[in-house]
Each structure stands twice: as structure tokens, then as C-alpha cells.
Image: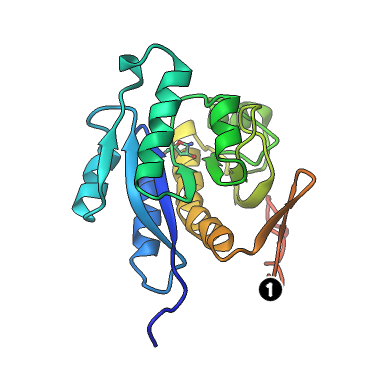
Amino acid sequence: MARVKARMKVGVVISGRGSNLQALIEAARDPDYPAEIVLVVSNVPGAGGLARAEEAGIPTETLDHRGFAGRAPFEDALTRTLERAGVELVCLAGFMRIVTEGFIARWHDRLINIHPSLLPAFPGLDTHARALAAGVKLAGCTVHFVRAEVDHGPIIGQAAVPVLPGDTEETLAARVLAAEHRLFPFCLRLVAEGRVRVAGEVAEIEGLGPPDPPLINPAPR
Ligand code: GRF
């Protein structure tokens, strides 16, 4: 049966290779997926993700932040670009600029980010090197609503992966990235279906099934 409900219009903002963007593109190919990507914006000219969007027939824009007189004018232009495309929700997918309060307020609870750690552990850069140095046994990724403090905000979902003996930054990053590609489309689905409500600074999710069994590392066997 044809889908009757309008799909949520999503803009994806990137700076790089766009593998998370690709995961969102793949998910949104399903006409039953509740969100459609109407625009991809990069602040880096020639970013790999732009080609992925073009390949999928999604409109793209490049807004090179270096061409603006500061963060505020850049973010104003970004907001105007997203609004022109009718964007209702913004996904930051490897966007490597800090966003300021004005932009966050404009898109309050309509701006989500993926971060490659189990927040609130390891906000900021070099998450995998820091996880290895700390000796954590589980690493992972987080999708959250964006707040003014970097890599903070109501958590929509998290995926955990084991840290294995002999892991390097690269092997751990690859394992986390594979989890990101599952987590981000799922979290976007939850938001687009209207199943996520922010109460206080906690995101509450409606209608979830029973959780998976615990991931224990080292595995007790
Ligand atoms: C991902 O690890 C994401 O969590 C972080 O930046 C990286 C982007 O990778 N915010 P890609 O451009 O999606 O491949």
C-alpha cells in the first residue's frame, strides 16, 4: 500500500568522506522509511560525501566556511540554505565545525549528531586513541540532539562494540564505524516517526521492544 504519511525532510551536513551519509541514503531508499534526504551541504569543497549524494540524485550545496566573515554569517547562510530546501531536521554526519548557540537554538531538538564514542565518555577529537589509552573494554558511538556544549545533548541511541586485544586506532575505528552505519539510520527513523521526546535533558523513546542481551567484554565463556 502506498505510504500516506509525508516523510520528514532531512538535510545532512558533512565535511568529509560521508560514509554515514551513505548509510542514511541507503535507508531512505526504502519508500517506507519515514525520512527523505532533500539536501546535502558540505563546508569542504570536493568532500567525498558530495559525490555520494550526487550519485543518489540528492541536491548538494557547498558552503565554504572560509568564505565567511565568522561563524555567525556562515551559520546564517547554512540555515537559509537548509530552509530553502524545506529541511525540517538536520543531521550532522561528520561535520567538523563547532556550531554556535544561535544555530543550535534555531534548530532546537531538530539537530542531531553522531559521535564515535559512548558519550559522555570521550567527547571531542581522537576518541579511539583515547579509548585505547584508557583501556576501556567497550567502545561505541552515540546519536544525540545537539546542545551548546560540544558532543553533549539528549542521547537518542548508542551502539557498543568490544575493544579487542591488539586493537589499533584504525581497527577500533572501523569496528565503531560499522556500528555507526546501523545506529544513525535507526535513530533518524525513531525521530522521524515522532517516537523521541525530550524531557528535561533526557530523550525518551516510545514503543521499543525488549533490549538485546548485554554485550560483555571479555566474553565470559
Ligand atoms: C564519524 O566517525 C562520525 O562519528 C564523526 O565523524 C566521522 C564521519 O565519518 N562525527 P563519515 O564522513 O560519515 O565517513
Q: Identify the residue under disc 1.
A: 209
**Against 220, is 46 above or below?**
above
Disc 1 residue crowd, few under 14, some 14–19, many 20+, Cα 10 Å: few
Q: Quadrant of residue 69?
A: top left
Name the colour scheme: rainbow
Looking at the picture, tell me which residue is in the foreground, 178 or 167. Answer: 178
Q: Among all residues in the image, which is located at the extreme bottom?
A: 1
In x, y percent, where is residue 84? 35, 43
Q: Quadrant of residue 138?
A: top right
Q: Is residue 118 left or right of residue 54?
A: right
**Label 1 element class:** loop
Q: On the rendered image, what quadrant is the C terminus found in? A: bottom right
Q: Residue at x 58, y 62 (%)?
A: 190
Q: Is residue 21 left or right of residue 198?
A: left
In x, y percent, where is residue 21? 37, 48
Q: Among all residues in the image, which is located at the extreme top?
A: 69
In x, y percent, where is residue 220? 73, 58
| Numbered marks: total | 1
